[in-house]
């Protein structure tokens, strides 16, 4: 039997869709401008690392992405940030909902002084995601599984979250963020308080989480950025100097400030 020839042109891989965008984002703390107009696209299901010397505005920018700067009294944010094309600074927008969609994990693991179970169940409870105990248990288990912690804690869910090791606590905080079904997870130096082994576990986890979430991570560790992220943005003195595929930024930086930083000339 003659085989039919397929004349359709090979399909190219579709460009990933943009989960978030920032346009001309400026932040002032009182008189002092900390970000001078940041423009960046954040594609879905990728990890974006923000690197740069201390005080250059990485955390400030990260906090813009879920309006955490709203709670800093003297901070003024201007410009436009979108999530799925919607302006997240729109007055109509519910900030509590936004922070469920764009979750955050902090530098120091900060579990609540509650049981492991209640730490993860906290978000689903306050967002009224379910009133059924079995469903809640399902969400808690799934979140702990996604955070790579289930096997280690499944027999001690009633014990305090604060009794876990540092690395486990950070994975518990990741599970807590995951439990409310976020689309984006922001991580502000999530491994800086952890030892190298716990750090490696979190880095592997970040790579897995990318399948279901979009991740933006601030890190002062360039090797970490190289290991975990597809894109890297280099910040310097409140500007975003360069934003490229991670491999490119570390092997062939375009700007001499980036080059100076990654070769350790300053930082
Ligand atoms: P990075 O994360 O790169 O270390 P930050 O975003 O923390 O940088 O800080 C950027 C600049 O904004 C720094 O000069 C810092 O001192 C200033 N800054 C950060 N937070 C505040 C704040 N709450 N009030 C006043 N200035 C701040």
Image (cartoon, helix red, strand yellow):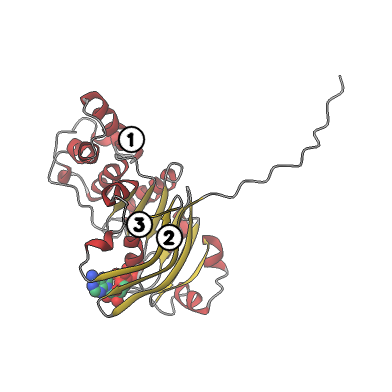
Which of the marked residues, 2 or 1, is nearer the chain's N terminus?
A: 2
Instruction: Identify the mark at residue 49; answer none if there is no mark.
Output: 2
Q: CA distance from mark 3 to mark 2?
A: 26 Å
Give residue 187's position: percent from left, percent from top: 33, 55
Q: Which of disc 2 and disc 3 is earlier in sequence? A: 2
Q: Dot 2 lies on which element?
A: strand
Q: Residues within 10 Å of mark 2 (few under 14, many from 20)?
A: many
**Left or right: where does residue 42 sit relative to residue 181?**
right
In the image, 264 versus 23, the foreground residue is 23
Q: Are marks 3 and 1 in contact (CB under 8 Å)?
A: no
Q: Are marks 3 and 2 in contact (CB under 8 Å)?
A: no
Above or below for 14 versus 265: above
Residue found at the very far front of the displayed protein: 92
Picture mark count: 3
What numbered label is drawn on residue 90? 3
Q: Position of residue 63 (x, y in %)?
A: 31, 61
């Amino acid at each position: 039997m003659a085989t039919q020839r397929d004349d359709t042109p090979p399909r190219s891989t579709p460009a990933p869709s943009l989960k978030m965008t920032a346009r001309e984002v400026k932040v002032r703390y009182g008189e002092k401008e900390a970000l001078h107009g940041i423009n960046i696209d954040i594609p879905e299901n990728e990890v974006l690392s923000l690197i740069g010397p201390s005080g250059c505005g990485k955390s400030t920018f990260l906090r813009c992405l879920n309006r955490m700067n709203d709670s800093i009294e003297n901070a003024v944010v201007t410009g436009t940030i979108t999530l799925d094309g919607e302006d997240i600074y729109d007055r109509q927008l519910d900030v509590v909902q936004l922070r469920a969609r764009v979750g955050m994990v902090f530098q120091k693991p900060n579990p609540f002084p509650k049981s492991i179970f209640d730490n993860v169940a906290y978000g689903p409870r306050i967002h009224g995601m379910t009133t059924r105990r079995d469903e809640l248990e399902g969400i808690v288990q799934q979140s702990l599984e996604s955070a790579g912690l289930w096997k280690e804690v499944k027999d001690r869910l009633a014990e305090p979250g604060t009794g876990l090791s540092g690395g486990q606590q950070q994975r518990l905080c990741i599970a807590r963020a995951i439990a409310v079904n976020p689309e984006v997870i922001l991580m502000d130096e999530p491994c800086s308080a952890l030892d190298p082994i716990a750090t490696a576990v979190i880095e592997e986890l970040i790579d897995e989480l990318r399948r279901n979430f979009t991740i933006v991570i601030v890190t002062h560790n360039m090797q970490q950025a190289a290991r975990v992220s597809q894109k890297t943005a280099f910040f310097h003195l409140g500007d975003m100097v360069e934003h490229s595929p991670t491999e490119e930024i570390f092997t062939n930086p375009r700007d001499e400030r980036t080059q100076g930083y990654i070769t350790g000339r300053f930082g």
